[in-house]
Image (spheres, helix red, strand yellow):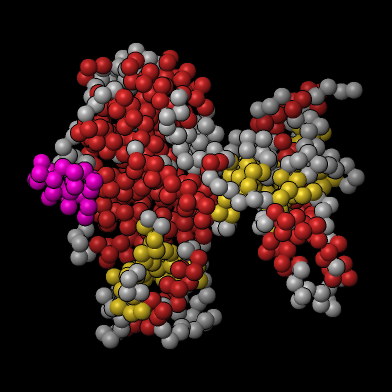
C-alpha cells in the first residue's frame, strides 16, 4: 500500500521543476495524486489531502457543483472559487475516461495590470471604493446651496455616467422634489421648459421611485431607447430613454430619496450598484453631520445653563456619527455602543461623578471615528494586515482628533479619542504616552475596547469568550492597563452585569421543523401546519443542513395550476414527491451569537426574508426575520437608554 507521501509526484511530461499545481481526482472527486506545488499550496499534511474529497480544500466544491461538473463532462470546465484561506483561485478540470479528473489550480491576482484590463468592471468598482472618501470630502466642503449639485457630479464620476439627478422624499406630504440634476450631455436636449431643480410632484408620478420603494434595492435598467419607451410620468422623462442606475438613499432605516445616474456606453452592473449605494448612504450622513456639528458649536455658548438639554443633543449626535462609521465598517458594527456601555458601568463603579460619566460615554461612542479616514478594504480585510496597512490603521486616533477639532465639548473628548490606544508602559500609539500622561477616561475606554473586541462576534470569527478576555486583560494588568480598571471590568462582565452584545440567540425565534431527504411533501405540509412554522430545514444522514423548504414553495407545488399536459406524470402527484426533489439548496444561516446588526446586514446581502439561526454544532434553532430583528433592536436600545 503506497504511503500518502509517495503520492506527491511529478511526471515525465510535467516535472516538479515546472511548479505546476495539479491533482488527479477519482470519480467521487477524491484526491488520488498531486504535484509538489499543489501539496505546498494546500498547507496541509499529505494524509489530510490524499483520498479526501476536494471539498475539504474548497468548500464551494459541494454536491451541487459536482453534479453540474458530471453533467457537463466532455466540456472545458473552469471555476473561480475561494480556498480554505479565503484566497481566490481558478480551477480547470479535465475529464479522464473511466479514470476520473485532472485538476489544475492557479491563483488569481486582481492587482495584476493585465487582469485589471480584462476586468474593467472590477477595476471601476475598486477605483470607486478608493474615491469615496475624496468625493465625500468634496460634498462636505461644498456650500449648502451647492451640496446636492456636487453630490450628483460625484455620483456621475463614480459610475462614469453622462447625466444624473437626485430626488428627495417628503414622508409627510408624500411628494418628491428634484434636489439637483446635471446638465444634459448635449445642449439641444436641455430645453428651457424641461423639469427644473426644486420641481415637486407626487411620489406616484415617478416610476423609478416606486420601484426603489418596493424592494429598497438598486434598480438597474440596461435597455436603450431602441428597446423601451419612456412613460408619460413627468419625472420619468429625466431618464432620457437611456441606460440608468437608481439607488435608494437610506438614513436610519428610512428611504429619504434616490440617486440616479443615466447614460453610459457600457451596461451598469451590480458592482456599480454596490459602489453607488455605499456612496449614497455615506452621502446623507455626510450632509447631516456638518449641519449637526455647526448647531452644536452654536449651542456650546450656553452650555452651563442648559447642561441637561445639551447632553441629550450631543448623545444623539454622537450616535449618528457612530452609525455613519458602522456603514463604512460593517465588521465592527455596534462596537462603539458596546464600548460606551461598558465604559459607563466601569466609571460608575469607580466613583466618577455624573458629569464625567456623561463625557466618558460620549467619548467612547466616537472613540473610533477616525476610521472614517481609513479605506474600507483595509477595515474589512478578514486576513492578516501587512505592516503598511497596520501602520495606516494606527493613524485613526489622529484622524479622529482632527475630525472633532473645532467642536467645543465640556469634556476632553479629543484626548479620549487620541489616547484610547496608549498603554501604561509607553508601548501604545500614536504618541507612546506613559501612565500619568494618559487621561483616566482614555484608560477606561482602552480596557473596555479590548474586552468588547474579544467578546464580540465577528463575521470572520466567533466570540473568543470570557476566559480568553480575562486572560488577556490580566496578562496586561499593571503593564498595559490600569490594574483597578481591569479588575472592575472583569467583575462587571464575569458577574454578567452587562450583556455586551444584543445576540439574536436571545431573541424570540420563530419555529421551524427538521425533515429528512425522503420526507414526502404531504408529510412536510402536515408538520409545518402542526408546528405553525413557515420553514422546514432538510438534514442529511449526518444531521447536517443541506436544504430548506418554505411554506411558499409548498404552496406552489400544491397549486391547482400545477399539472399541465406538458408535465410528466409524477409532477402531477406532488403528494408523493420527496423533499430532496424540490428543496432549495442555498440556506440563509446565521450564528446564534451574531448581533441584530449582523442579521440585518445578512438579510440585505442575501435579499432574504428570513435567516435560519444555528448553534455552535451547526444545528438549527429557529427562524428570525425582519420583524423579530426590529423588536430585538428596540429592546436593546431600551437597555441602552436605561443604562
Return the x and y of residue 513 as percentages of the image width and height.
Answer: 71, 50
The answer to whether residue 27 is left or right of residue 423 is: right
* Residue 623 magenta: no
- Of 350 and 221, which appears nearest the observer? 350
Q: Quadrant of the N terminus?
A: top right
Return the x and y of residue 57 as percentages of the image width and height.
Answer: 69, 36
The boundaries of the magenta stretch are 291-314
The answer to whether residue 576 is left or right of residue 447 is: right
Return the x and y of residue 625 as percentages of the image width and height.
Answer: 55, 54
The answer to whether residue 578 is left or right of residue 133 is: right
Where 239 falls versus 515 (above or below)? below
Q: Quadrant of the C terminus?
A: top left
Tell me what residue is drawn at x 34 percent, y 43 percent: 641
> Which corner quadrant of the image does residue 529 belong to?
bottom right
- Any part of residue 611 in sight: no
Where 260 falls versus 62 (above or below)? below
Where 189 falls versus 415 (above or below)? below
Q: Farthest residue toward the front?
A: 530
Tell me what residue is drawn at x 51 percent, y 56 percent: 627
Amino acid at each position: 500500500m503506497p504511503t500518502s507521501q509517495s503520492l506527491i509526484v511529478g511526471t515525465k511530461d510535467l516535472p516538479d521543476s515546472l511548479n505546476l499545481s495539479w491533482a488527479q481526482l477519482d470519480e467521487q472527486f477524491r484526491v488520488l495524486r498531486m504535484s509538489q506545488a499543489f501539496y505546498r499550496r494546500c498547507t496541509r499534511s499529505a494524509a489530510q489531502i490524499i483520498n479526501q474529497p476536494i471539498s475539504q480544500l474548497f468548500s464551494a466544491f459541494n454536491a451541487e457543483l459536482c453534479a453540474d461538473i458530471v453533467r457537463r463532462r466532455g466540456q472545458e470546465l473552469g471555476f473561480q472559487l475561494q480556498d480554505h484561506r479565503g484566497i481566490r483561485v481558478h480551477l480547470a478540470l479535465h475529464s479522464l475516461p473511466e479514470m476520473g479528473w485532472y485538476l489544475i489550480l492557479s491563483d488569481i491576482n486582481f492587482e495584476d495590470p493585465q487582469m485589471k484590463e480584462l476586468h474593467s468592471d472590477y477595476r471601476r468598482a475598486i477605483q470607486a471604493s478608493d474615491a469615496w472618501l475624496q468625493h465625500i470630502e468634496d460634498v462636505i466642503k461644498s456650500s449648502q446651496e451647492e451640496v446636492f449639485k456636487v453630490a450628483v457630479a460625484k455620483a456621475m464620476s463614480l459610475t462614469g455616467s453622462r447625466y444624473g439627478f437626485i430626488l428627495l422624499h417628503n414622508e409627510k406630504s408624500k411628494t418628491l422634489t428634484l434636489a439637483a440634476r446635471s446638465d444634459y450631455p448635449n445642449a439641444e436636449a436641455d430645453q428651457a421648459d424641461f423639469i427644473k431643480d426644486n420641481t415637486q410632484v407626487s411620489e406616484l408620478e415617478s416610476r423609478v421611485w416606486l420601484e426603489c420603494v418596493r424592494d429598497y434595492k438598486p434598480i438597474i435598467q440596461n435597455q436603450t431607447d431602441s428597446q423601451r419607451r419612456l412613460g408619460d410620468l413627468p419625472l420619468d422623462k429625466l431618464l432620457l430613454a437611456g441606460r440608468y442606475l437608481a439607488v435608494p438613499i437610506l438614513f436610519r432605516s428610512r428611504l429619504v430619496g434616490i440617486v440616479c445616474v443615466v447614460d453610459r456606453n457600457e451596461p451598469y452592473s451590480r458592482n456599480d450598484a454596490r459602489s453607488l449605494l455605499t456612496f449614497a448612504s455615506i452621502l446623507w450622513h455626510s450632509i447631516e453631520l456638518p449641519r449637526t456639528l455647526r448647531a452644536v458649536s452654536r449651542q456650546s455658548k450656553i452650555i452651563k445653563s442648559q447642561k441637561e438639554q445639551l447632553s441629550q443633543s450631543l448623545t444623539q449626535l454622537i450616535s449618528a456619527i457612530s452609525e455613519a462609521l458602522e456603514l463604512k465598517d460593517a465588521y465592527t458594527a455596534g462596537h462603539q455602543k458596546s464600548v460606551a456601555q461598558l465604559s459607563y458601568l466601569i466609571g460608575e463603579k469607580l466613583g466618577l461623578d455624573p458629569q464625567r460619566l456623561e463625557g466618558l460615554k460620549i467619548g467612547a461612542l466616537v472613540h473610533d471615528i477616525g476610521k472614517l479616514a481609513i479605506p474600507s478594504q483595509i477595515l474589512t480585510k478578514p486576513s492578516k494586515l501587512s505592516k503598511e496597512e497596520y501602520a495606516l490603521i494606527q493613524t485613526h486616533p489622529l484622524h479622529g482628533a482632527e475630525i472633532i477639532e473645532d467642536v467645543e465639548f465640556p469634556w476632553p473628548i479629543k484626548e479620549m479619542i487620541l489616547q484610547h490606544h496608549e498603554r501604561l508602559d509607553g508601548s501604545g500609539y500614536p504618541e507612546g504616552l506613559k501612565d500619568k500622561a494618559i487621561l483616566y477616561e482614555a484608560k477606561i475606554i482602552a480596557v473596555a475596547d479590548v474586552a468588547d473586541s474579544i467578546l464580540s462576534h465577528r463575521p470572520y470569527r466567533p466570540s473568543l469568550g470570557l476566559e480568553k478576555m480575562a486572560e488577556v486583560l490580566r496578562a496586561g494588568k499593571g503593564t498595559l492597563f490600569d490594574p483597578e480598571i481591569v479588575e472592575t471590568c472583569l467583575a462587571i462582565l464575569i458577574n454578567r452585569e452587562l450583556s455586551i452584545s444584543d445576540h439574536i440567540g436571545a431573541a424570540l425565534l420563530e419555529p421551524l421543523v427538521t425533515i429528512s431527504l425522503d420526507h414526502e411533501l404531504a408529510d412536510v405540509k402536515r408538520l409545518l401546519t402542526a408546528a405553525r412554522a413557515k420553514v422546514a430545514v432538510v438534514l442529511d444522514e449526518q444531521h447536517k443542513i443541506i436544504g430548506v423548504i418554505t411554506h411558499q414553495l409548498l404552496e406552489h407545488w400544491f397549486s391547482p395550476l400545477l399539472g399541465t399536459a406538458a408535465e410528466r406524470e409524477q409532477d402531477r402527484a406532488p403528494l408523493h414527491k420527496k423533499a430532496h426533489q424540490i428543496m432549495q439548496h442555498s440556506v440563509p444561516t446565521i450564528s446564534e451569537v451574531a448581533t441584530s446588526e449582523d442579521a440585518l446586514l445578512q438579510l440585505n446581502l442575501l435579499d432574504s426574508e428570513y435567516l435560519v439561526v444555528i448553534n455552535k454544532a451547526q444545528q438549527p434553532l429557529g427562524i428570525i426575520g425582519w420583524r423579530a430583528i426590529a423588536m430585538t433592536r428596540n429592546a436593546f436600545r431600551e437597555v441602552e437608554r436605561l443604562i
